[in-house]
Image (tube, rainbow, N blue to C red):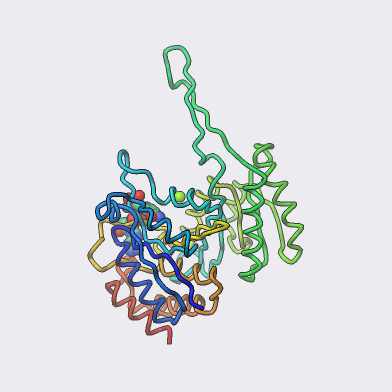
Amino acid sequence: MSTTITVIPGDGIGPEVTSATVEILQASGADLDYDEQLGGVTALEQVGTPLPDETLDSIRRTRVALKGPLTTPSGSGFRSINVALRKEFDLYSNVRPARTIVPGGRYEDIDLVLIRENTEGLYVGVEHYIGMGDDPRAAAESVMIVTRHGTERVVRYAFEYARTHDRRKVTVAHKANILKYTQGLILDVAKEVATDYPDIEFEDRIIDATAMLLVLDPYRLDVLVMENMFGDILSDLMAGLVGGLGFAPAGNIGTDAAMFEAVHGSAPDIAGKGIANPTGLLLSACMMLDHVGDMETAARIRKAVDTVVRRGDVRTADMGGDASTKEYTRAVIKALF
Ligand code: NAI
Ligand code: MG
């Protein structure tokens, strides 16, 4: 039985990388039906709202979305639709794999996965100023929210992910030595959850030491799980280990829905030129295939991407080549067979 997914091409280079990705998915034989929906500035221009009800209804139905980048106006204008979608569907785990594709970088054969808590921590935005004397902003306070429920589900997801993806170890990175209540709760809950997974090695590490280890000897880590802000920072560090954001995929996973997207944005500087690299979204689509249970097709597409990129004759401009999005797409499709 085929799986229906919601497809949101989005803004800027979004439609270009989305059509490339869908073309490759179709060629791969993945058993999917595509329900295309609007989102972002494109939706605002066409139907007067950046997040139409039809789009939300579609995700409620399909429970799986593949999303292109959405432009967020800075300063004034509407708030981030990406954040709105994460909130609406309570997408509590942000999964960011970092895997070497282009050889010859700082490290060879990096293969790490960071799972970031996506709904709690300091990013809940509970902040205020404290006035003193005639200075209304003499100080500022921000509250870090950690719940047992929120921690348990993300740590459990990390272990389930390790199991289903043949991973050997889960590391929880924390700062429980200093923040004894908030981070201490995370550490305690992680240790409890770990007892349910005797088949997976478990360790805890202090966050700053983890950052150093990632740079000195990343091969000693495997799956990492941590709270929101730590995860935000270290996931970009990990993307740097494998050559930047161009190839970075991401999944936002909730209990009732999941949304897969490239880490990069709408790249307005190259939009419409037909030169965008679709790999980030394509690898996100592979995560989506894993999620819906088609690991085999996901592996085939990843292998085709590796073949084309390593061969090196058909690369987009950001990879140092001069191929168009379409030429690269055709090369990946050819490498599937
Ligand atoms: P960006 O990632 O769009 O672009 C940064 C640089 O990387 C640009 O030079 C761009 O040309 C290049 N680049 C990005 N993706 C590429 C690709 N697939 N192929 C080739 N080159 C690529 O980041 P920027 O400029 O900070 O943000 C632009 C817009 O995207 C903003 O409105 C921002 O809010 C939004 N954004 C949306 C995200 C999402 O929907 N998840 C994530 C990040 C940014
Ligand atoms: Mg970030």
Vertical arrangement, residue 51 with respect to residue 305, above or below = above
In the image, residue 110 lies at what x, y percent?
A: 54, 66
Q: How many marks?
A: 0
Work out whether residue 36 or residue 218 is closer to the camera in this orientation and state it: 36
Q: Quadrant of the C terminus?
A: bottom left
Residue sitting nearer the eye, 2 or 162 = 2
Name, please, the residue furthest toward the bottom: 337
**Residue drawn at x 37%, y 43% as measured from the top left:** 79
Q: Residue at x 46, y 12 (%)?
A: 133
Q: Quadrant of residue 312?
A: bottom left
**Residue pictured at 65% horizontal, 37% vertical:** 179
Q: Position of residue 171 (x, y in %)?
A: 65, 56
On the image, the x and y values in percent for residue 34 come to 40, 71
Query: Which residue is more in the foreground, 183 or 214?
Result: 183
Question: For this view, does 327 lie left or right of residue 238?
Answer: left
Left or right of 311? Residue 288 is: right
Residue lying at the far left of the rendered structure: 273
Q: Quadrant of residue 136?
A: top left
Along the horizontal axis of the image, is 301 left or right of 39?
Answer: right
- Residue sitting at 56 percent across and 42 percent down? 121
> Going by the picture, which residue comes out furthest to the top?
133
Image coords of residue 168 (percent x, y): 67, 67
Ligand 1 - quadrant of the structure image:
bottom left
Q: Quarter-wise, where is residue 54 in the image?
A: bottom left
Q: Nearer the viewer, residue 297 or 167?
A: 297
